[in-house]
C-alpha cells in the first residue's frame, strides 16, 4: 500500500521539473542497480548521497522496501508493488506501465545489510529533525555509533533546539561519549556523570573503554563507580525481566490448560484431543487471515470468536459422538480421545499439508514497550498475558454467575441429584465440553502468534496442560491459574543456570513428586465427595 | 475352540507369508529405492525429496532410462521412526533388490540405515548437510560437510561484516554439537577469545525463546559486533525468529546465519521481520542460471503448483542422481561394487552454473553461497566462495579426527585411515 | 492455607518413607472389658462438622445399635474407626493398647476390625467362593499371598460360612451376578471369614425381605458375645428387634451422642423425640 | 505337570504356546531352505517376526498391570527403552576397536564429544552377565521407586496414567541430552556382535528370533503363574473394589507395587531383545506416543486375557507395517479409528469375540 503512495509521490515530484529519462544521475543509477554485482549497488547509493538528488530519499525508501525490480528480458529498471503475474510494473525512467507475465523475469534489486545500514545512516540524519520524538530517538541511537564527526555536529546542533527531554538526554549521552574522548578533565567528569546516569549500552561500553585506557586515576575511579551503579541497575532489571518472561510463559501454559481445567477438572473427562482443539483454533486464525489478507490487524480479533465457535463445535461433536458413551470410564475416554487426536492431526495434514503455515503478527501486536534501554517488554507477550487474564475471569464469571455455570457445578458434584432437580445433565455435559473446547480454540489464536502453526502444535502442549491442571488441583480453575504461573516463573528462573532442557525436566520431576505428596493438587476439592 | 484355533493360526500364517512373499523380479526395469518419511514429524521436509526423486526418475525415463532400461521408483515410508529406516532399507535391498537408495534426512536415520547398506553392500545417496565424521564405502554424501557450509559462513561474517562476538545456538543433537565444536575450534584458531563465544543448546521443538533471545541481545549489546550462528532445527525456528522480531533484534544489529533454514522452512514463517538475516547453503532457488530455471520449471510442472519452492537438499538429490546415472553408464552395470568404483571422479553440472565432482572420500565438491532473507521468502546471494569446496569427511578441527583421511580408491580403499598410526579402522573390508 | 499445609506435608519426611517400617499392631488388650474407645472426636469438611466431640465406648462382646437421622455422622464415625478418615481432634483406641489413629485401613483390619459397607461391595469378577477365600484371616504379605495354598480346614471353614449365608448353590458363580440381598449376605459372610473382634455393620438390611431381615438379626445376635458388633441402621423395627429389652442403643445427632440407653429409654427421651419428630 | 496346570483352563494360552513352539521349530527350518524355494522365509522377515514377538512381550507386561490391576500405564515404553539401552550399551562395548575412530574403549559418539573416559555407569557393561542383570534390575528399580511413591500416596486412576506419561516424557528429554552420555538424539547404533556372534549373520538373527519366542513363552507362563495364584485373585479384587480389599487387610499398595515392578522387568527384557534385532536404540522409544500405542495393542487384543495382548500387538504392528508401505497417509487415520472403535464397540477386544463364540458353542 504505502509503496504505491510513494510511487505517486515520486511521479508528482517529477512531473514539473523534467523527464527523468534524461536525468544523467538516474540513468547511471539504473545501470548500477540492474548490475548483478553488489559493489555496484553500494556505488549507486553513494552516487545518490553525493548527488543530493531531490528524489534521493524517495528512492532510498523504495530501495529499503525492495520495490525496485529489473526485468531480465529488457534489462530495464521497474517499480513493482507485488511481483505476481497480472500485476503492473512501472518503468522507472519513462513511467511506462507494463503488465507482468512471468513473475520470475522480474528480479528484485536486493540490498544487503551493509547497504541497508548505509542508507539508514543517511536517512537518520534527516530523522533528527523529524516531528515524532520516536523517530528522533531512533535517529540519535543510529548515529551514536557513527564515528564520523559530521553526525556528531548534527546532534550538537539539534541538541540546542531539542525540546523533548528523553531525546535531549539521549543526545546528551551521545555527546558525552564524544567528550569522554577529549582531554578537558572537567568536561570529562560531567561526561562520566551523564553516562553513569544512562543505561544505554553504548554509554556503558564507552565507560568500559575509558576505564581500560585512561591514566587519570581519579577519573578512572569515578568511571568505575559509575559502571558498578549501572551493573546493579542492570541486575535488577534482569530480575524483573525474568519474572516477566516467567509470567508470559505461565500465561501461555494457563491458556493452553484452562480449557482442560473445565473438561477434565469440572467434568472429569480426560480429553487427549485437547491439544488438537488448540491446533484447530490456530488454523482457524490462519484461514481467517487468508480470507482478509488486507486487514491483518483486524483478522486476529475476528479469529477469537471464530476459533471459539469452530473448536467448540468440534468439541461438541466429539462429546456427542464418543465421550458421552464413556462417562464413568475415564480410562476408556482417555484412549478414545487419543485416537481422535491422531485423526485430527492427520486430517489437518491432508487438508493443509504437513508444512507449517504462516500466521502474521498484526502491527499493533509487534514492537516493544521500552521502559529503558535495558528493560523493555515485548508487546505480543504483554497482550497474551492480558488476554489470558481476560479469558480466565470471563470463565470464572460464567461458572460462578450464569445458570449454565450453576448447572455445571451441580452436575459435576452430584449427577444423579442434579438430574433429580430437573437439570438436563446431557445438555449440560454438551455445553460444558463445548465451552472447554472453545476456550482451547481461543488459546490456539494466542499460540498462533508466538509459535508454529502446524500439525504438531497440539502435541507440544498436551502434556504441559495436564501437568498444570493436575498440579493446580482438579476442579479448581484458580488452581490452574496459580499452577500455570508458578510453573512458568519457576521454569524461567531455573533456565539460566540449568539450561532449557534440564529446567523442563526438573519441573516435570517436581510435579511427579508433588502429586505423590498431594494427589489432589495445590487446591484440592475437600469434603466427603472427594474422600476415598 | 477349534474355530478359534484355526482363526489364530491362519492369522499368523497370513502374517508370515504376506511378509515373506517375494515380489516377482521384473528384469526389464532397474529399481531405485526412495527412502523418505511420508508421515510423522519429518514428513514436513522429506515428502518434498520423495517428489523430487520421482520427478528426476520420470525425466530420466523420458530420455530413455539407463542402460536402455526404464527406471522404476520403489517408494517406502519409514514414518519418521528411526528403527523403521533400517527395516525399510533392508526391505528395499533384500526384497526389492533396488540398485540404489536415495533417502534419509536426519543424522539418526542415516546412522540407522548405515549398518544395513554396509551389510548388504547397497548404495545410499544422502542429500542433507550433516556433521561429517563419517565415510562409508556404501554411502555417498551429496549434502554439505561442515567445511562446505559452516566454515565459509563464519569466514564471511568475520571478513565481510567484521563480526567479533559469536553466539553458537543449536538444537541439542549431533549435527549442531559437532558443527559448533568445529566452529569453536576454528574461531579460537582465528584468535577469538573464549569470552566472545556463547554456546547454547535447546531441545527439539523448543518454543519459548524469550530468555535466550534477551541473553543474545545483552551479549550483543556489549560493544563488539555480534552474530548468531544458528544450527537450530526445524520447528524450533519459527518461534525463535518470531521472538527475534518481537524483541526488535534486526539483521543490522545482530545478524543470524542459519544452516538449516531454507526456502521451504521460510514458507512457514512471516518473513517481514527477518529480512537481512542470513543462511549458508550450496544452492538457492533465487540463483539465476539456465539450469536452475529449467529445474524450477520442471518442478512446477511436475507438482502442478507454481508456488512450490526448491531448496538445497533437492539440488543434492539432483546431483546425486545424475552422478549415479553417469556412473552406471560408465560401469555398464548397476552392480554396487562396480558403481562404487566408477562413480569416484564422476563430474556432473550442478544447478548453480558449476560442476560437482565425486571425491574419493564419497563427498562432492560444492560452491558455498551466503544468502540474505528477503521479504518474499527468497534468499539474495550476497557472497559466494570463489571456487567450489571439497567436502571434508573428517574435520581438521576436531581432536579425534584431524589425523584421519578417507580414500575409497584402491589400494587404500578405507573410510577412516589414520595417517599417524597408519591404520584403517571402522568399516574394514579385509 | 492449603499452601501452608503443603509446606508442612513436604516438611514431614517420614510420611514419604512410611512404607519402610511395616505397621505391626501391638496385641489387643481388653482387660478393662472395653473394646473400643472414641473420645473427643471431631472432624469437619469445609467447615461442616461431620463429627463434633463424639464420645463412644463399646464393651467387649457387646451388640450395639446406633441410630440417627441422615448426616448424623454415622458413616463418618465408621470411616474414622476403620482409618479411612483421620479426625481433626480426639482419640480412638482399640482396647488399651492399639491406637487406631496411627494405623491405616489394612493395619486396622488385621488388628481385628471388620466393616460392612452401606452399599454392598464384593469382588464382582470373582466367584463367591474366591470372595470368601480372600477374606480368610491370614498372612497378608505379598509373597505369602503369591505362594498361598488352600488347606483342608480352611476350605471346610469356607463351606461352613457358605452354609451360614445360604449361598451354597452359588459357590462358583461370579459375585457380580448375585442379587442385591445375596450380595449383602456374601459381604456379611466375608466378615465372618475375617473373624474380626469388632464388626461394624452399616445398614445391613437395606433392600432385604422380612425373612432375610430376621435371619440377619439372628445372625448378628448370635455373633455378639465372641465378637463385638456395632450396627448402624435406619429401620426402627429391625433395631428394636436387635436391641431387645436390655441392649444399649446410641442416638447420634449432628456428629455427637444425643442419647444412650435401652430402646425404651431412648424412645422416651425428649431430645430424641424432638430430633425425630422435629417438635 | 506344574506348567500344564498354569494353562489348563486357558485355551488362548494353549494355542499361543502351541504356535510359539511351532514357530521356534518351523521358522529356522523354512529360513534354511534355498531362497528360491516357495516356502523360504527370508532372513529379514525372520528378524521382523522376532521384533514383533518382543513387542508382543511388551504388550503382555502392560496387560498384566492394566488388565489385572486396573493401572492404565502410559509410560511402559520407558521400561522397555531402559532395558533396550542397557543392551545397547553392552553391544556398544562389544564394538571395541572397530568403531570409526578405532578407540579401544570409548564409543564413537563419546570420542567426537571429546570425552576422555567412560562415564562410571558404563563400567562393567562389556560383560554380558552383568548387562543381563541390569536389563532386569534397572527397569525394575525405576518401577519400584516410582511405584513405591505413587501407590503409597494412593495416586490412582487417571492421575497415575498422567504421571506415568510425565515420567517417560521426562526420561525422553533427559536421554536427548548429549551430556547424559547415551548418544543423545542418535542413541546407540552400528552394533557389531553379541556374545561373539556377528549380528549380521543369518544364524544370529534366527537365534535372536528363537530367543524372543522363548522369552515370550516364559513371560506368558510367569504372568500366568501370578494370575493363577491367590495374588492374581487379590489383583482382580483390588482392581474391582480397592477399598474393600483394604478393609480385608490387604496392603493394596504392596500388591500393586510388586506386580508393577514385575511387569516393568518383563518390559525391560522385551526391550533388550528388541534392540539387537532392529539395530538401534534412541530416545524416541521413550516418547509418550509409543507408550500409549502399546496400550491400544492390549485394548485391541482384549484386556485381562494375556494372550489377547499378544494377538493385539502382532495384529496392530503388522497393520502398521502394511499401511506404512501401502498407504502411508491413511495409517494415522486407521490407528486413530481403531482407538475409538475398540473402546466404543469392542471393550473386550478381539479375544472378547472368540470368548463369546466359545460360550455359544
Image (cartoon, grey):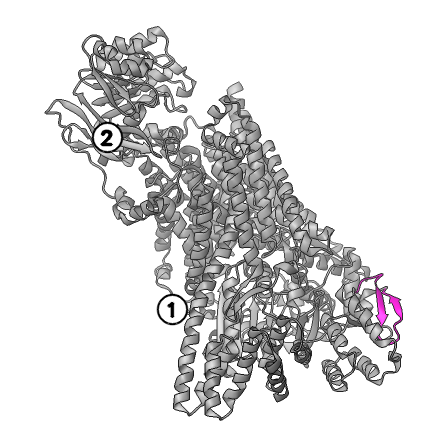
Q: Are marks 1 and 2 in contact (CB under 8 Å)?
A: no
Quadrant in the picture for residue B118: bottom right
Q: Residue at x 56, y 77 (%)?
A: A168
Q: Compare residues A284 and D60 and report the one nearer the observer.
A: A284
Q: Position of residue A506 (x, y in %)?
A: 41, 55
Q: Which residues are magenta?
A: A83-100
A91 within the magenta span: yes
Which of the pair B293/D9 is nearer the observer? B293
Q: In terms of depth relative to the viewer, which is nearer, C139 or A31?
A: A31
In the rendered view, would you say A145 is above or below B338? below
Residue at the spot 33% in from the left edge and 43% down from the top edge: D148
Residue wearing tag 2: C41
Q: Tell me if mark 1 has few (under 14), some (14-19) or many (20+) residues whose alpha carbon lies within 10 angstroms of its own.
A: few
Whether discs 1 and 2 lie on one chain: the answer is no
Q: Nearer the viewer, residue C74 or C194?
A: C74
How far across and how far down the image is residue B398, in percent? 49, 75
Q: Quadrant of the N terminus of chain D?
A: top left
Q: Is residue A455 magenta?
A: no
* Residue C132 point in image, percent of width and height: 31, 21
Q: Residue at x 52, y 62 (%)?
A: B210
Q: Residue furthest top?
A: C211
Residue C163 against residue A473 in the figure, above or below = above
Whether residue C213 sits left or right of residue A436 in the image: it is: left
Q: Is residue B187 above or below residue A323?
A: below
Q: Quadrant of residue C261?
A: top left
Residue at the disc numbered 1? D117
Q: Is residue D105 rendered to the left or right of residue C86?
A: right
> Separation of disc 1 and disc 2 at Cα?
64 Å
Q: In this view of the protein, can residue D39 be seen by the observer?
A: no
Report whether D62 appears left or right of C52.
right
Which chain does tag 2 point to? C
Is residue C20 in view? yes
Amino acid at each position: 500500500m504505502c509503496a504505491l503512495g510513494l510511487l505517486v509521490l515520486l511521479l508528482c515530484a517529477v512531473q514539473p521539473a523534467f523527464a527523468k529519462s534524461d536525468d544523467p544521475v538516474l540513468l547511471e543509477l539504473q545501470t548500477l542497480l540492474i548490475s548483478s554485482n553488489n559493489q555496484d549497488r553500494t556505488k549507486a547509493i553513494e552516487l545518490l548521497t553525493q548527488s543530493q538528488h531531490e528524489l534521493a530519499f524517495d528512492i532510498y525508501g523504495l530501495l529499503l522496501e525492495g520495490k525496485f525490480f529489473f526485468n531480465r528480458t529488457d534489462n530495464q529498471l521497474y517499480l513493482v508493488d507485488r511481483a505476481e503475474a497480472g500485476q503492473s510494473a512501472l518503468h522507472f525512467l519513462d513511467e511506462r506501465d507494463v503488465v507482468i507475465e512471468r513473475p520470475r523475469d522480474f528480479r528484485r534489486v536486493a540490498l544487503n545489510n551493509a547497504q541497508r545500514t548505509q542508507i539508514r545512516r543517511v536517512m537518520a540524519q534527516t530523522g533528527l529533525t523529524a516531528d515524532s520524538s520516536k523517530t528522533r530517538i531512533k535517529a540519535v541511537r543510529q548515529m551514536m555509533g557513527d564515528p564520523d564527526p559530521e553526525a556528531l555536529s548534527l546532534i550538537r546542533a539539534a541538541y540546542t533546539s531539542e525540546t523533548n527531554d528523553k531525546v535531549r538526554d539521549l543526545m546528551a549521552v551521545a555527546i558525552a561519549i564524544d567528550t569522554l574522548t577529549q582531554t578537558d578533565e572537567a568536561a570529562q567528569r560531567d561526561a562520566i556523570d551523564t553516562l553513569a546516569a544512562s543505561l544505554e549500552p553504548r554509554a556503558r561500553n564507552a565507560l568500559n573503554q575509558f576505564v581500560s585506557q585512561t591514566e587519570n586515576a581519579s577519573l578512572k575511579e569515578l568511571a568505575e563507580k559509575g559502571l558498578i551503579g549501572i551493573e546493579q541497575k542492570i541486575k535488577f532489571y534482569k530480575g524483573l525481566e525474568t519474572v516477566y518472561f516467567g509470567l508470559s510463559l505461565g500465561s501461555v501454559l494457563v491458556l493452553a490448560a484452562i480449557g482442560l481445567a473445565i473438561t477434565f477438572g469440572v467434568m472429569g473427562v480426560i480429553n487427549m484431543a485437547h491439544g488438537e482443539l488448540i491446533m484447530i483454533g490456530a488454523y482457524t486464525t490462519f484461514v481467517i487471515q487468508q480470507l482478509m489478507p488486507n486487514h491483518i490487524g483486524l483478522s486476529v480479533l475476528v479469529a477469537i470468536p471464530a476459533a471459539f465457535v469452530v473448536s467448540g463445535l468440534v468439541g461438541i461433536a466429539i462429546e456427542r459422538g464418543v465421550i458421552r458413551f464413556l462417562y464413568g470410564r475415564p480410562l476408556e475416554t482417555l484412549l478414545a480421545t487419543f485416537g481422535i487426536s491422531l485423526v485430527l492431526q492427520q486430517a489437518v495434514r491432508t487438508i493443509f499439508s504437513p508444512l507449517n503455515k504462516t500466521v502474521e503478527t498484526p502491527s499493533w501486536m509487534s514492537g516493544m514497550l521500552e521502559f529503558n534501554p535495558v528493560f523493555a517488554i515485548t508487546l505480543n507477550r504483554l497482550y497474551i498475558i492480558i488476554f489470558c487474564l481476560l479469558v480466565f475471569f470471563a470463565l470464572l464469571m460464567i461458572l460462578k454467575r450464569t445458570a449454565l455455570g450453576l448447572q455445571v457445578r451441580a452436575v459435576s458434584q452430584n449427577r444423579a441429584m442434579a438430574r433429580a432437580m430437573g437439570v438436563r445433565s446431557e445438555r449440560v455435559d454438551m455445553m460444558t465440553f463445548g465451552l472447554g473446547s472453545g476456550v482451547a480454540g481461543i488459546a490456539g489464536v494466542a499460540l498462533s502468534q508466538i509459535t508454529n502453526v502446524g500439525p504438531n502444535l497440539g502435541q507440544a502442549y498436551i502434556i504441559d496442560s495436564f501437568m498444570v491442571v493436575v498440579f493446580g488441583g482438579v476442579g479448581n480453575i484458580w488452581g490452574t491459574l496459580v499452577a500455570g504461573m508458578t510453573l512458568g516463573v519457576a521454569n524461567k528462573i531455573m533456565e539460566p543456570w540449568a539450561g532449557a532442557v534440564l529446567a523442563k525436566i526438573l519441573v516435570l520431576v517436581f510435579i511427579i513428586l508433588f502429586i505423590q505428596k498431594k494427589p489432589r493438587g495445590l487446591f484440592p476439592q475437600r469434603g466427603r465427595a472427594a474422600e476415598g | 475352540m477349534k474355530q478359534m484355533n484355526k482363526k489364530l493360526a491362519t492369522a499368523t500364517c497370513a502374517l508370515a507369508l504376506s511378509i515373506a512373499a517375494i515380489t516377482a523380479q521384473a528384469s526389464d526395469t532397474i529399481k531405485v529405492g526412495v527412502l523418505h518419511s511420508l508421515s510423522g514429524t519429518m514428513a514436513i521436509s522429506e515428502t518434498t525429496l520423495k517428489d523430487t526423486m520421482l520427478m528426476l526418475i520420470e525425466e530420466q525415463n523420458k530420455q530413455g532410462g539407463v542402460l536402455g532400461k526404464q527406471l522404476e521408483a520403489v517408494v517406502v515410508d519409514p514414518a519418521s521412526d528411526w528403527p523403521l529406516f533400517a527395516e525399510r532399507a533392508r526391505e528395499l535391498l533384500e526384497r526389492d533388490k533396488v540398485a540404489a537408495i536415495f533417502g534419509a534426512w536426519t543424522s539418526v536415520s542415516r546412522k540407522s540405515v548405515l549398518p544395513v547398506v554396509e551389510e548388504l553392500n547397497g548404495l545410499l545417496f544422502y542429500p542433507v548437510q550433516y556433521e561429517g565424521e563419517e565415510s562409508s564405502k556404501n554411502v555417498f554424501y551429496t549434502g554439505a560437510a561442515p567445511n562446505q557450509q559452516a566454515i565459509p559462513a563464519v569466514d564471511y561474517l568475520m571478513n565481510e561484516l567484521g563480526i567479533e562476538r559469536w553466539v553458537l545456538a543449536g538444537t541439542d543433537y549431533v549435527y549442531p554439537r559437532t558443527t559448533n565444536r568445529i566452529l569453536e575450534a576454528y574461531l579460537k584458531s582465528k584468535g577469538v577469545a573464549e569470552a566472545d563465544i556463547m554456546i547454547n543448546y535447546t531441545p527439539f521443538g523448543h518454543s519459548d525463546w524469550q530468555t535466550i533471545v534477551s541473553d543474545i541481545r545483552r551479549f550483543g549489546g556489549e560493544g563488539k559486533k555480534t552474530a548468531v550462528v544458528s544450527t537450530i532445527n526445524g520447528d524450533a525456528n519459527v518461534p525463535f525468529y518470531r521472538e527475534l522480531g518481537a524483541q526488535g533484534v534486526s539483521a543490522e544489529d545482530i545478524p543470524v546465519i542459519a544452516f538449516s533454514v531454507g526456502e521451504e522452512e521460510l514458507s512457514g514463517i512471516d518473513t517481514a521481520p527477518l529480512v537481512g538475516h542470513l543462511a549458508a547453503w550450496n544452492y538457492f532457488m533465487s540463483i539465476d542460471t539456465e539450469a536452475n530455471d529449467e529445474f524450477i520449471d520442471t518442478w512446477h510442472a511436475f507438482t502442478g503448483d507454481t508456488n512450490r519452492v526448491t531448496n538445497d537438499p533437492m539440488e543434492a538429490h539432483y546431483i546425486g542422481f545424475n552422478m549415479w546415472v553417469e556412473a552406471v553408464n560408465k560401469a555398464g552395470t548397476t552392480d554396487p561394487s562396480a558403481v562404487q568404483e566408477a562413480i569416484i571422479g564422476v563430474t556432473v553440472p550442478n544447478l548453480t552454473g558449476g560442476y560437482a565432482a565425486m571425491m574419493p572420500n564419497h563427498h562432492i565438491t560444492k560452491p558455498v553461497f551466503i544468502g540474505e532473507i528477503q521479504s518474499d521468502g527468497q534468499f539474495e546471494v550476497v557472497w559466494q566462495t570463489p571456487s567450489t569446496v571439497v567436502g571434508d569427511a573428517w574435520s581438521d578441527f576436531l581432536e579425534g579426527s584431524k589425523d584421519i583421511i578417507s580414500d575409497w580408491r584402491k589400494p587404500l580403499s578405507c573410510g577412516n585411515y589414520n595417517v599417524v598410526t597408519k591404520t584403517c579402522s571402522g568399516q574394514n573390508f579385509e | 492455607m492449603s499452601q501452608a499445609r503443603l509446606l508442612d506435608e513436604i516438611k514431614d519426611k517420614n510420611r514419604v518413607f512410611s512404607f519402610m517400617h511395616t505397621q505391626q499392631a501391638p496385641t489387643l488388650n481388653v482387660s478393662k472389658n472395653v473394646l473400643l474407645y472414641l473420645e473427643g472426636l471431631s472432624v469437619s469438611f469445609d467447615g461442616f462438622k461431620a463429627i463434633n466431640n463424639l464420645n463412644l465406648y463399646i464393651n467387649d462382646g457387646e451388640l450395639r445399635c446406633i441410630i440417627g437421622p441422615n448426616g448424623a455422622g454415622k458413616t463418618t464415625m465408621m470411616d474414622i474407626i476403620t482409618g479411612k478418615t483421620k479426625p481433626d481432634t480426639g482419640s480412638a483406641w482399640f482396647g488399651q493398647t492399639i491406637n487406631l489413629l496411627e494405623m491405616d485401613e489394612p493395619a486396622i483390619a488385621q488388628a481385628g476390625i471388620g466393616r460392612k459397607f452401606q452399599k454392598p461391595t464384593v469382588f464382582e469378577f470373582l466367584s463367591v467362593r474366591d470372595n470368601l477365600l480372600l477374606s480368610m484371616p491370614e498372612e497378608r504379605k505379598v509373597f505369602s499371598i503369591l505362594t498361598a495354598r488352600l488347606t483342608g480346614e480352611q476350605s471346610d471353614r469356607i463351606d461352613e460360612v457358605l452354609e451360614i449365608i445360604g449361598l451354597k448353590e452359588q459357590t462358583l458363580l461370579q459375585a457380580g451376578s448375585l442379587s442385591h440381598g445375596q450380595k449383602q449376605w456374601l459381604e456379611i459372610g466375608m466378615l465372618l471369614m475375617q473373624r474380626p473382634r469388632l464388626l461394624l455393620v452399616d445398614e445391613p438390611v437395606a433392600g432385604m425381605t422380612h425373612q432375610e431381615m430376621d435371619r440377619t438379626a439372628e445372625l448378628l445376635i448370635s455373633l455378639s458375645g465372641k465378637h463385638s458388633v456395632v450396627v448402624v441402621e435406619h429401620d426402627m423395627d429391625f433395631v428394636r428387634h436387635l436391641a431387645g429389652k436390655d441392649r444399649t442403643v446410641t442416638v447420634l445427632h449432628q456428629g455427637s451422642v444425643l442419647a444412650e440407653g435401652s430402646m425404651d429409654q431412648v424412645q422416651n427421651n425428649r431430645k430424641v423425640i424432638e430430633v425425630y419428630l422435629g417438635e | 505337570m506344574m506348567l500344564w496346570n498354569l494353562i489348563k483352563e486357558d485355551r488362548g494360552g494353549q494355542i499361543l504356546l502351541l504356535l510359539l513352539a511351532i514357530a521356534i521349530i518351523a521358522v529356522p527350518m523354512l529360513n534354511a531352505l534355498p531362497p528360491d524355494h516357495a516356502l523360504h522365509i527370508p532372513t529379514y522377515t525372520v528378524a521382523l517376526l522376532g521384533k514383533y514377538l518382543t513387542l508382543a512381550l511388551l504388550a503382555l507386561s502392560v496387560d498384566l498391570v492394566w488388565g489385572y490391576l486396573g493401572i492404565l500405564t502410559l509410560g511402559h515404553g520407558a521400561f522397555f527403552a531402559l532395558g533396550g539401552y542397557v543392551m545397547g550399551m553392552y553391544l556398544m562395548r562389544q564394538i571395541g576397536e572397530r568403531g570409526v575412530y578405532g578407540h579401544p574403549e570409548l564409543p564413537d559418539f563419546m570420542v567426537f564429544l571429546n570425552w576422555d573416559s567412560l562415564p562410571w555407569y558404563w563400567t562393567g557393561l562389556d560383560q554380558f552377565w552383568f548387562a543381563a542383570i541390569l536389563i532386569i534390575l534397572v527397569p525394575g528399580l525405576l518401577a519400584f521407586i516410582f511405584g513405591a511413591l505413587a501407590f503409597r500416596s494412593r495416586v490412582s486412576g487417571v492421575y497415575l496414567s498422567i504421571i506415568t506419561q510425565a515420567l517417560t516424557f521426562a526420561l525422553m528429554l533427559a536421554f536427548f541430552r548429549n551430556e547424559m552420555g547415551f548418544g543423545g538424539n542418535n542413541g546407540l547404533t552400528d552394533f557389531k556382535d553379541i556374545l561373539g556372534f556377528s549380528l549380521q549373520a543369518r544364524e544370529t538373527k534366527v537365534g535372536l528370533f528363537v530367543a524372543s519366542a522363548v522369552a515370550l513363552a516364559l513371560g506368558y507362563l510367569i504372568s500366568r503363574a501370578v494370575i493363577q495364584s491367590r495374588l492374581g485373585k487379590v489383583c482382580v479384587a483390588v482392581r474391582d473394589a480397592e477399598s474393600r480389599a483394604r478393609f480385608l487387610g490387604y496392603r493394596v499398595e504392596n500388591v500393586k507395587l510388586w506386580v508393577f515392578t514385575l511387569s516393568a522387568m518383563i518390559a525391560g527384557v522385551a526391550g533388550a531383545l528388541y534392540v539387537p534385532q532392529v539395530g538401534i536404540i534412541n530416545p524416541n522409544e521413550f516418547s509418550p506416543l509409543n507408550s500409549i500405542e502399546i496400550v491400544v495393542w492390549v485394548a485391541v487384543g482384549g484386556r485381562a486375557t494375556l494372550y489377547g495382548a499378544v494377538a493385539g500387538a502382532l495384529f496392530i504392528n503388522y497393520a502398521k507395517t502394511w499401511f506404512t508401505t501401502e498407504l502411508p497417509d491413511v495409517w494415522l487415520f486407521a490407528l486413530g479409528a481403531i482407538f475409538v472403535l475398540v473402546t466404543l464397540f469392542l471393550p473386550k477386544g478381539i479375544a472378547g469375540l472368540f470368548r463369546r463364540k466359545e460360550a455359544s458353542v
